[in-house]
Image (cartoon, rainbow, N blue to C red):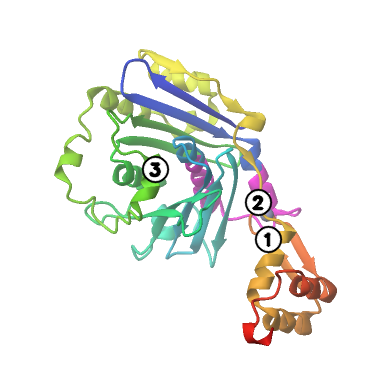
């Protein structure tokens, strides 16, 4: 079963998490592949999406936030968009849009950053948005401080965490067709420093390019000896170990000399699991958003409206009667010119 484990280092300003997505990740792949396997993404795309799913769970698990954390990559290569969305209850879904061929063993740049135009966006979308309240979105490029392309998603997200939270973060991510897994180590904020939970009020933190010039913030980054030591240990974790070892073994191997305090793992109904938030109702609202003329155009051409969910594969079918109901239901009509009434 998929699991999320949290831990702290007793008396040290460092915390961490390990996620292992097994059934949840396999379900996402299975739905994408379809009954014949024909819909499966190329392997490099599956691995990227798996790393995004694992990272999304870690990032959602790292904040106190009631809503969806949406991790998106907008690529300028064959992967146009890749999305992993994790709710605060840790239910998750993921999908990607791929256009054209993907070379075997394609690197991150080859997938999403051929012209250094790729972007990674992290959106916090509150569950019960107040009127006028915006989702918080931070955007980071897929290149480093010297404009060198980054070849690991973990590096991209470490940049993001540093910029959005001013906290050193170490991420190790890996995915294959069985497991999507990740390890996160983070320096704990001391004395009410910025953290992600408070960032919603700060508006966009679009990083654009360089890490910014705030010297005082940068001064305290990278200086905690305990964090630095634990980070080095974390980075020694090999891909194969992360994918194949159980969490107890991973933590024992890496941190056997450290004062590790572990919390009750989140598994099953309380852990990461696949769920899609699509519904017939939502699709109907989307069709309503298209407008009646557009919907009638589709009906005239095809006899029905068929909408498939990219995340879970569910097909929603609307015949002319269904469509008429969408537009005749109370509140279904766009406001008519008030002078008519
Ligand atoms: Zn769905």
Question: Answer yes or no: do the residues labelled 3 and 1 have beta carbons within 8 Å?
Answer: no
Q: Callout 2 environment at 10 Å: few (<14), some (14 to 19), or many (20+)?
A: few
Circles 1 and 2 in contact, beta carbons < 8 Å? yes
In the image, farthest residue toward the bottom: 340
Disc nearer the start of the sequence (1/2): 2
Assess mark 3: CB under 8 A from ligand 1? Answer: no
Query: Residue farthest to the right?
Result: 321
Front position among marks 3 and 1 = 1
Identify the image quadrant of residue 302. bottom right
Give me the C-alpha separation between circle 3 and circle 1: 33 Å
Residue 12 picture location, percent across and down: 31, 19
Residue 233, percent from left and from top: 34, 25
The residue where tag 2 is placed is 277
Please, what secondary structure does the residue beneath circle 2 have? loop
Secondary element at tag 3: helix
Can you identify the residue that label 3 sits on?
154
- Indicate yes or no whether the magenta region holds residue 271: no
Q: Which of 289 and 69 is in front in this view?
A: 289
Whether the residue under disc 2 has CB within 8 Å of ligand 1: yes
What residue sits right under mark 1 in the picture?
282
Q: How far apart are marks 1 and 2 (CA)?
A: 9 Å
Disc with the residue nearer the chain's start (3 vs 1): 3
Instruction: Identify the residue at horizontal 51%, vertical 53% (top origin).
Output: 130
> Which image quadrant shows ligand 1?
bottom right
């Amino acid at each position: 079963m998929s699991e999320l484990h949290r831990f702290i280092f007793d008396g040290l300003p460092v915390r961490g998490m390990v996620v292992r997505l097994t059934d949840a990740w396999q379900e996402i792949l299975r739905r994408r592949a379809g009954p014949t396997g024909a819909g499966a993404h190329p392997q490099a795309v599956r691995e990227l999406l798996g790393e995004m799913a694992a990272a999304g769970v870690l990032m959602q698990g790292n904040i106190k936030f009631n809503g969806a954390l949406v991790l998106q990559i907008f690529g300028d290569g064959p992967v146009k968009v890749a999305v992993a969305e994790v709710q605060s209850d840790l239910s998750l879904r993921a999908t990607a849009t791929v256009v054209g061929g993907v070379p075997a063993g394609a690197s991150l740049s080859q997938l999403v950053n051929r012209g250094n135009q790729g972007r990674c966006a992290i959106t916090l979308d509150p569950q019960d948005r107040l009127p006028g309240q915006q989702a918080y979105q931070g955007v980071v490029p897929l290149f480093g401080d010297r404009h060198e392309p980054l070849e690991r998603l973990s590096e991209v997200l470490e940049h993001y965490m540093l910029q959005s939270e001013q906290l050193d973060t170490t991420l190790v991510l890996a995915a294959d067709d069985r497991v999507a897994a990740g390890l996160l180590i983070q320096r704990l904020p001391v004395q009410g420093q910025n953290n992600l939970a408070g960032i919603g009020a700060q508006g966009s933190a679009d990083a654009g390019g360089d890490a910014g010039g705030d010297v005082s913030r940068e001064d305290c980054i990278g200086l905690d000896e305990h964090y630095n030591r634990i980070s080095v240990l974390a980075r020694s974790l090999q891909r194969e170990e992360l994918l194949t070892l159980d969490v107890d073994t991973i933590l024992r191997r890496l941190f056997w000399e450290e004062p590790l305090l572990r919390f009750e793992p989140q598994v099953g109904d309380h852990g990461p699991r696949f769920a899609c938030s699509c519904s017939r109702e939502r699709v109907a609202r989307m069709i309503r958003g298209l407008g009646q003329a557009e919907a009638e155009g589709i009906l005239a051409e095809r006899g029905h409206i068929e909408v498939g969910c990219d995340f879970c594969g569910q097909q929603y079918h609307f015949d002319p009667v269904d469509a008429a109901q969408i537009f005749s239901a109370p509140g279904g009509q766009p406001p008519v010119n008030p002078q008519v009434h």
